[in-house]
Amino acid sequence: MEISLAAEKIGHIGSFPVTNSMVLSWIASIILMISSLLATKNLKKIPAGIQNFFEAIVEFLFNTADSIIGDEKVTKKYFPFVATIFIFIITNNWLGLVPGVGTIGINEIKDGHNILVPIFRSGAADLNMTLALAITAVIAVQIFGVAAIGTFKYASKFINFKGPINFFVGILELLSEFSRMISFSFRLFGNVFAGEVLLMVVASIAPLVAPIPFFMLELFVGFIQATVFAMLTLVFIKTATTEAH
């Protein structure tokens, strides 16, 4: 099996190329949509079964978010966006650890060698997906900031001619917004991709027992990376929606 930094193309929809990471992201989205429908199909005041399970998750995430925001009313405003990011990322990360992902594929000839192109690959192991999430998060932060404190007050964080120090601070703030996209996307991509490579190498050396502790580690890493992405987004939202003094 060849280790490819980029997601591999496995087909086309018309002229639109479909990659293996894209397929797993679609599966993650379908799983989440079906789970949401099942959890909210017959809502009860005293939850049970799948409703109880999802309410416990939502309550945990909300309490965590509220501990950062510090205002329950404000938390309710931004919680759906941040929780969606967390749940989507962790679903993608953990789906990437399902047996068969990365090992079931199509044999192709490349440079005279027979290689296996996996049909499924973790969505976060594709830089395009993590970059798209990062851009979405950063743009959303700007929109929330403008909506909370107004266009001109928010713009004054980046464009300020009240003094040379304020001007350069504004430029630095502007540059930091772009650096967040790079930081967000490469942190998530790097950790997930490195985990995939690690599991692949360990499995090729000792396929039965050796991968188990690393598999458990990757479950933890997948949770941590989803948490870091979502919590940093929430911190940036709080900063953007607070008027500078």
Image (spheres, rainbow, N blue to C red):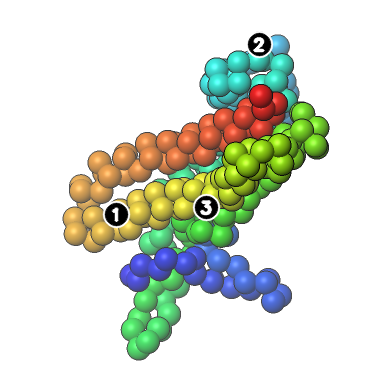
- Depth order, front residue of 109/34: 109
Measured as percent of width and height from the top left, residue 225 is found at: 45, 40
Indicate left or right for 135 with 216 as reference: right
Q: Calculate the distance from the C-alpha at mark 1 to the C-alpha at mark 3.
A: 23 Å
Measured as percent of width and height from the top left, residue 145 is found at: 72, 34
Measured as percent of width and height from the top left, residue 66 is found at: 59, 18
The residue depicted at 65 percent of the width and 15 percent of the height is 71
User: Residue at label 3?
Assistant: 182
Q: Is residue 89 visible?
A: yes
Foreground label between 3 and 2? 3
Numbered disc 2: secondary structure: loop
Residue type marked 3: Ile
User: Residue at label 2?
Assistant: 46
Residue type marked 2: Ile
- Depth order, front residue of 156/84: 156
- Depth order, front residue of 181/229: 181
Residue type marked 1: Leu
- Depth order, front residue of 245/213: 245
Q: Which quadrant: the N terminus?
A: bottom left
Foreground label between 1 and 3? 3
Q: How crowded is mark 2: few (under 14 residues within 10 Å), some or many (20 or more)?
A: few
Q: Which quadrant: the C terminus?
A: top right
User: Residue at label 1?
Assistant: 198
